Amino acid sequence: MAAPYPGLVSAPSPVPEPAGSHETAGPVPLVLAGRRPAGGRGRPPRHLADLPLAERRAVVAGLGQPPFRASQLSRHFFGRYTDQTDEMSDLPRAARDPLAQALLPRLLTAERELSCDGGTTRKTLWRTFDGALVESVLMRYPDRVTMCVSSQAGCGMACPFCATGQAGLTRNLSTGEIVAQVVAGARLLADGKVPRGGSRGVASPDDTARVSNVVFMGMGEPLANYASVLAAVRRLTEPVPEGMGISQRSVTVSTVGLVPAIVRLAAERLSVTLAVSLHAPDDELRDTLVPVNRRWKVAEVLGAAWDYAAATGRRVSIEYALIRDINDHAWRADLLGSLLAGRLAHVNLIPLNPTPGSKWTASRPAAQREFVRRLEAHGVPVTVRDTRGREIDGACGQLAASARSPLPAGG
């Protein structure tokens, strides 16, 4: 996934939230007509990543084991990135399998793995316990390692330029399923299976061998799966053994504009970055590109974003996929610049990673340069996202679409 895509939201019709989180339920997801989650799916197995440490201890005690075994088990998963009992020499042999069966079920199975950029970009297609397909991407740079994770299997948005949106929404992912994507990437790094991010494999002084950044920009709309995503953020950022110990400031949660959920996230007083997938500065075009805009208009979405920035002190990232002759006009750059001027915001321009057979394609280089120039003329900070992964079905949802197969009976 070259440009990990900002999460794409569901639209106006509320439906009950599918099971998938073991914590307090969040706002109900919203799904476009004809894009509802498939029914008849079971709940993912309970995993220690679904639970706060105190609840893990209670589960362990219920198995007749000392509660401190929960911390030991958690250190293996969050600190050593393993769920293999034969690597847990500090646990009594007789206790290993019962503990793992209760708190470390296998949630994801690698269906397909692809790499490019000399092996520093690795995309994995995962199959969940019920046959759903999700994707994650590890990107190793000289100074950081970023994991782009999915929060839903599919997406309910039907955004016309997005492969995930074209596939529809299957279900929400559980907290454990989200966290497991990051732990899997961390294990690859720990095992030395990802080359260094420096030029020609030569390390820079800042080269890191651990996951340092997590972006919720894979499949799905994160804020439509609020409870599981919030719990995942906590697991990822709490110190070992509670979680993985990644800095909150290194986590980005994206949304196309679920305004009530943005307001709720601001009240959490976290230090995560909010990324708003805007893609158009005017309602007329955004109604087409991002159908949820028919419910929450550009002014409402940006108003919630500025409130988030005020509450957290964190700069908001405005994601903008540049699409040739659709949203890359000079006047739209000026309109976007006028909306963002003087705000605590940064524009992340994304050269569109086109999906096969789609009429949507990336802007011409000259149009991209002019768009950047006009934003800068308004005093708006802007960068163009590094385009990785075009040769490995890079756009979000492409790999899942190419590998999609019938679900098991009962799925």
Image (tube, rainbow, N blue to C red):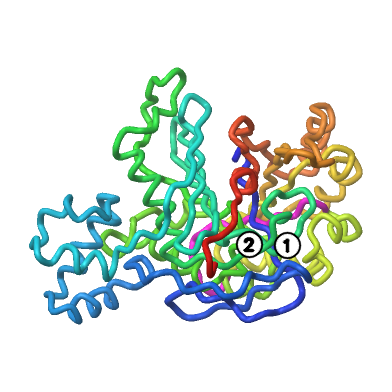
Q: Where is mark 2, residue-wise? A: 221
Amino acid type assigned to the residue bearing label 1 in the image: Met
Amino acid type assigned to the residue bearing label 2 in the image: Glu
Left or right of residue 197, residue 226 in this image: right
Please say whether residue 274 is visible from this viewpoint.
Answer: no
Q: Secondary structure at mark 2?
A: loop
Instruction: Name the residue nearer the viewer: 344 or 353.
Output: 353
- Give how far across and how far down residue 409 sits, in percent: 53, 66
Q: Are marks 2 and 1 in contact (CB under 8 Å)?
A: yes
Q: Where is mark 1, residue-wise? A: 157
Residue 397 painted magenta: no
Left or right of residue 57, residue 49 in this image: right
Count neighbours of disc 1 (C-alpha within 10 A) and say few if under 14, some if 14 to 19, many if 20 or more: many
Residue at 81% over, 37% down = 371
Q: Secondary structure at mark 1?
A: loop
Quarter of the figure that contains the C terminus: bottom right
Residue at 36% over, 71% down = 46
Please say whether residue 200 is visible from this viewpoint.
Answer: yes
Instruction: Name the residue nearer the viewer: 308 or 253.
Output: 253
Residue at 82% over, 29% down = 364
Q: Is residue 239 above or below residue 4?
A: below
Report the Cα–Cα distance between label 2 and label 1: 8 Å
Instruction: Name the residue nearer the viewer: 265 or 186.
Output: 186
